[in-house]
Image (cartoon, rainbow, N blue to C red):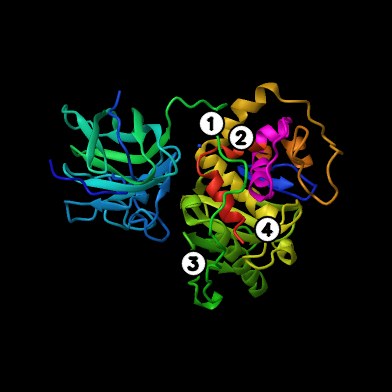
Amino acid sequence: MKKPLIITCYLYILTACSGDNSIDIDMQPSPVSTISSSSSSSSSSSSSSSSSSSGPAGGINQDFDLPGRIQAQDYTRAYEIDPNREGDAQGQCSTGEADMAQTQDNNGICYVGWVTEGEWLEFDTLTNAQSTYDITLRAAAGTQTASPRRISIHLNDTPLQTVTIPAKGFESFNDVVIEDITIGAAKQTLQVYFETGDINLNYIDIQYANATPSTPPEENPSLPTGTQSCTPVSMPDLDDIPNSTALASANNDIRAAFEVSGNTIVSKLVRDQRYGDIALQYWQKFATRIPVKYRTQLIQFNVYTGGSRAGWFDGTGKNSDLGRPGYTIAINANLADSAGEPCDPLIAKRGYFDWTLVHEFGHLINLTTGTTELFSQVFDKNEPRRSRNPQDYARDGSPKTEGNFVTSYAEREGGDEEVAETFTTYALINTLPTNNSLVAQKIRFIGKQPSYGALRKALQAP
């Protein structure tokens, strides 16, 4: 067998969530081995197209923290036998070595498809300590032939296991689990080798084996130490960013909008120069503080005016402005005075730009990692009574680290909003609580989620 390639809504104190799909805030038996990250691929019987251009998918130059979910389009390296380009002709699923198209499956953007026997993907991964994981392949297979459709998984060129993908149709994705894989510390390479064609791959989910929602692996409650420092991401001149015809259909309250891919502003809508400048200020701080690997599914960033909301997040995953899958974050222009410089210390108080930005991003990462659902499973069953007019909170917007809820907004709204508020508290406060109160348990639970400690370190980098 040919050696596979290594792939390695928030308001200040005003309103609740809106009734639509946006979220307002108040103003995630096999042999034992060691693994590393790689890329993904898939196959399909038909192609589709996207209406808007975006940055390239595939060839991601980063190490994926484990545990975590790796999207197929984010492969590190790929080997493609067929030189003909198949799949999407436009958009973020149209570039890179592997053939890809938009997926309608849950929790995905592109699937890798049109694969030929012998093609492969590699993903580079990174872990802090040796652990045992379950690897879930989210894949589909065509029904054209009766022969089994197979993928083999390798770790650092060592075969782990070959699995059969249920042949129920190219759009009928299934979870195929490889259990109890031991992955050593440091950088590893996970390889996905297509033993046959007629397979689509949406993502690879690598999670701790035998983990339960209430007992995720422990993380040091102190802020991670290290030499990481804040370096501002450079921004282009507003006039040098291409105008977007797709974004022109955005609601009238959107004064500036960016189509984004990674740190790149692909195209823009600017209805007023002043708000275009604010959007650049906001986006620079967002891109500087939050590493790209945590926001690969974000495709639109808006600045708007009016209303009582300080920010909102569109959690549908179906962007109507750009006409393709992806998520949108929007921030009110009235927070510009508190936005500051990209590397200014972040302010851990409600009503400030920093809190709003991290809160809305919290919706995105908690949704895409499954943390919102896990939080609900753990804490909803014994939830204390909530007040619609909570009073026992700091007037300056500082969150609580004792009691039952981090903020009045978290108490009043609950659900996704409480998870986002708890995430924001975890991410921004300097010292995590060690007491046994319910709110301290919630904050520590957020901190136990995969990769959140490294994210907190990046947000607080001096």
As helix, strand or loop, the secondary structure at mark 3 comes to: strand
Task: Please tell me the numbered disc located at residue 267.
Answer: 3
Question: Is residue 275 in view?
Answer: yes
Which mark is nearer the camera, 3 or 4?
4
Task: Tell me the chief SS of the magenta region.
Answer: helix
For mark 2, does the 10 Å Cα neighbourhood hold few (<14), some (14 to 19), or many (20 or more) residues? many
Q: Name which residue lies at 35% across and 33% down.
A: 182
Residue 340 picture location, percent across and down: 69, 67
Q: Which residues are magenta?
A: 419-442
Whole-number angstrom distance, CA of label 4 to CA of label 1: 27 Å
As helix, strand or loop, the secondary structure at mark 2 comes to: helix
Q: Which residue is mark 1?
A: 216
For mark 4, does the 10 Å Cα neighbourhood hold few (<14), some (14 to 19), or many (20 or more) residues? many
Q: Name which residue lies at 33% across and 50% down.
A: 75
Whole-number angstrom distance, CA of label 2 to CA of label 1: 8 Å
Three-letter residue code for mark 2: Phe
Three-letter residue code for mark 3: Ser
As helix, strand or loop, the secondary structure at mark 4 comes to: loop
Q: Quadrant of the C terminus?
A: bottom right
Choose between 185 and 459: the one closer to the eye.
185
